[in-house]
Image (tube, rainbow, N blue to C red):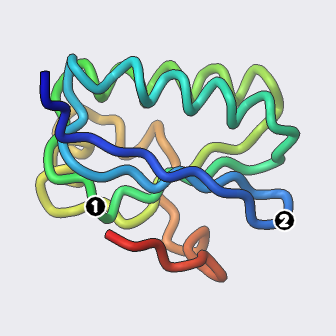
């Protein structure tokens, strides 16, 4: 089975950056959940999901983001989303998640560029 989804994780000081690319759907949800679990256990005070390479997200992918955000809040860790493409940003707005999840361009400051 071919999975058109990838997560590149790296630490930048107290930040854990997860650069996602491809399609975040039912087939890819467990991969992102595992990476979020590792990021939450990494000791980072901030987790940044860089969505620049994300081409598509469905309701399962949105659920992963919501659960990750809830778990981060419970652990006292900030989780932010940056660089959403037009389709992803529109879906976050339509579902009301743009207000719930942190979409903060300031989180991009100092992010290492990842190959995409």
Residue at 73%, 58% in the rendered image: 11
Residue 25 in percent (x, y) is at: 20, 26
Mark toward the start of the polypeptide (1 vs 2): 2
Query: In front here: 82 or 43?
Result: 43
Q: CA distance from mark 1 to mark 2?
A: 23 Å
Q: Residues within 10 Å of mark 2 (few under 14, many from 20)?
A: few
Which residue position holds label 2? 13
Residue 83 in percent (x, y) is at: 37, 66
Query: In front here: 5 or 82?
Result: 5
Image quadrant for the N terminus?
Answer: top left
Question: Left or right: where does residue 39 sit relative to residue 60?
Answer: right
Circle 1 — which element?
strand
Mark carried by residue 53: 1
Residue 2 in percent (x, y) is at: 13, 30
Question: Left or right: where does residue 69 sit relative to residue 20?
Answer: right
Q: Are marks 1 and 2 in contact (CB under 8 Å)?
A: no
Residue at 36%, 56% in the rendered image: 51
Residue 47 in percent (x, y) is at: 66, 48
Residue 10 position (above or below residue 41): below
């Amino acid at each position: 089975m071919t999975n058109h989804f990838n997560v590149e994780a790296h630490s930048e000081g107290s930040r854990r950056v997860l650069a996602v690319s491809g399609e975040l759907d039912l087939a890819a949800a467990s991969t992102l959940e595992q990476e979020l679990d590792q990021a939450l256990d990494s000791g980072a005070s901030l987790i940044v999901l860089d969505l620049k390479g994300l081409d598509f997200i469905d309701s399962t992918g949105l659920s992963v983001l919501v659960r990750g955000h809830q778990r981060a809040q419970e652990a006292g860790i900030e989780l932010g989303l940056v660089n959403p493409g037009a389709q992803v940003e529109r879906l976050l707005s339509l579902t009301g998640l743009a207000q719930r999840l942190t979409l903060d361009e300031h989180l991009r400051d100092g992010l290492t560029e990842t190959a995409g």
